Amino acid sequence: MGKANDFTLIGAGIMSATLGVLIKELMPDAQITIYERLDRVAAESSDAWNNAGTGHSAFCELNYTPMRDGTVDISKALKISEEFEISKQLWAYLRKNNKVPTTSPFINDIDHMSFVWGEDNIEFLRKRYDALIEYAMFDDMKYSQDHNEVKEWIPLMMKGRDINEEIGVTRMAIGTDVNFGSITRGMIRYLETLDGVEVICGMHVSDINRNKDGSWRIEVEELETGKESEVNSRFVFIGAGGGALKLLEKSDVPEGRGYGGFPVSGQFLKCNNPEVIAQHEAKVYGKAATGSPPMSVPHLDTRMLDGERSLLFGPYAGFSTKFLKNGSYFDLPLSIEIHNVWPMLSAGIHNIDLTKYLIEQVFQSPEDRFDFLKLYYPEARFEDWELITAGQRVQIIKKDEKSGGKLQFGTEIVSNEDNTLLALLGASPGASTAVSIMLKLLTICHPEKMNGEWNGKLKEIFPSYGQSLIEDGKLLNKVRDYTTEILKLEEI
């Protein structure tokens, strides 16, 4: 038998970092090993250049509020917004107790806006606004169709715009920009100072098998030397982003059967003109094209990246057979097995619009991409922008009794029968809701402790723990004031 420990976390991104912190806060004596395939942590999906960084709070993402039978369904927006508030509470707790030292703020205040044009889209946005402001979570939202007022909010986008064009815009001043790479690295650095935690980079997990005693045997390979070893662990979390699907398949747990994945890459236009960058201070989201995946909602986005203010527009979808930006071109073909062939084919048949959208995106010319930007920024100049490649995401496909297979949007926890191996599949809005996802994971594994002996500590970390921020407006405002003060949210 090889080295043994309590917890093995695969992938050193925002999910494993969050889970590791929560485990050590609730179980200080726990032994944790975190394996990362790359030579540094937070270099894949959590990296600032590979992540939208919106602080997905559903303030501006219109795909979270679909129209159903003439009314706007805001249930998902409310849930995501509440989950982001929970994330901020953990970050505030860590900041307050000096557990995440960072050289620059990992979270900044920035307006979140939705911007549409056309009669149907304006009607939709107005209905969305009317529904959302009924809740304290969104009661600070502003709505305008007035060009002069909108020009005060986002002057860059109004330059050169036809004064007769009908537009609709919502604005949430409490929005944020989050550098998930920075907060992840901060949490990992903190974990490395604790007894019983080991973070090992440059280590590839090659196989996962069940031992006779119920523990898990994880086979690993040191990429630099090729040296192989193994670790035995009573609990395994697979938080490897796009790589999680392949590792779930290697574990051979029956609960993982029927899952497939389709990779979607992202590209952005990055502004390289400081004068233009200085004129825009907002994250402005539009409506996604028909058939596009959730992570493809167009946005003109002010970001703080590597300590510098940046301006991005996109994303533009691309195609690669890699499941990770630093993955292998064999990822997709090697993920196809007997158990998921039919779900993947069925999902493809039932989502022709998505296939068509991806094909159109792949064959877009630079001029086509630039024309799309000009819908949002009419006076944009071609020479001010360059195309960059962002992150790689895997759209999860799940077995479905009725249709054979369906696209599974959002994130999903897959656990084995005794909840000793759990894998996280999916993408958006994962990073922003990582804390809630990991609290759900711990509840799956330890329901009695979460509602029993750990309750006091959880309430210390999360002042709203066990209460609804959606229904209790006074509690929401109290928590927001607390996290805003501790995180020192200031306008960019």
Image: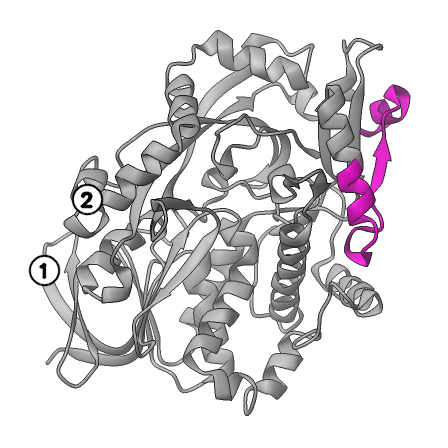
Is residue 135 a member of the stretch shown in magenta? yes
Q: Which mark is residue 227?
A: 1
Q: CA distance from mark 1 to mark 2?
A: 28 Å
Place of residue 447 in the rendered image (x, y in percent of width and height, measured from the top left): 48, 83
Question: How many numbered callouts?
Answer: 2
In the rendered structure, the answer to whether residue 11 lies left or right of residue 174 reads left
Q: Does residue 95 sit above or below 175 in this rendering?
A: below
Quarter of the figure with the N terminus: bottom left
- Single out the residue that lies furthest toward the bottom: 453
Q: Which residues are magenta?
A: 127-154
Kind of residue at badge 1: Lys
- Number of other residues with Cα within 10 Å of mark 1, as a class: few under 14, some 14 to 19, many 20 or more: few
Is residue 353 a member of the stretch shown in magenta? no
Q: Does residue 147 sit above or below 305 in this rendering?
A: above
Place of residue 65 in the rendered image (x, y in percent of width and height, measured from the top left): 65, 43
Residue, disc 2: 336
Query: Colour mode?
Result: one colour
**Res 75 seen here:** yes
State the image quarter where residue 199 is shown.
bottom left
Q: Does residue 105 sit above or below 62 in this rendering?
A: below
Q: Secondary structure at mark 2?
A: loop
Quarter of the figure with the C terminus: top right
Q: Secondary structure at mark 1?
A: loop
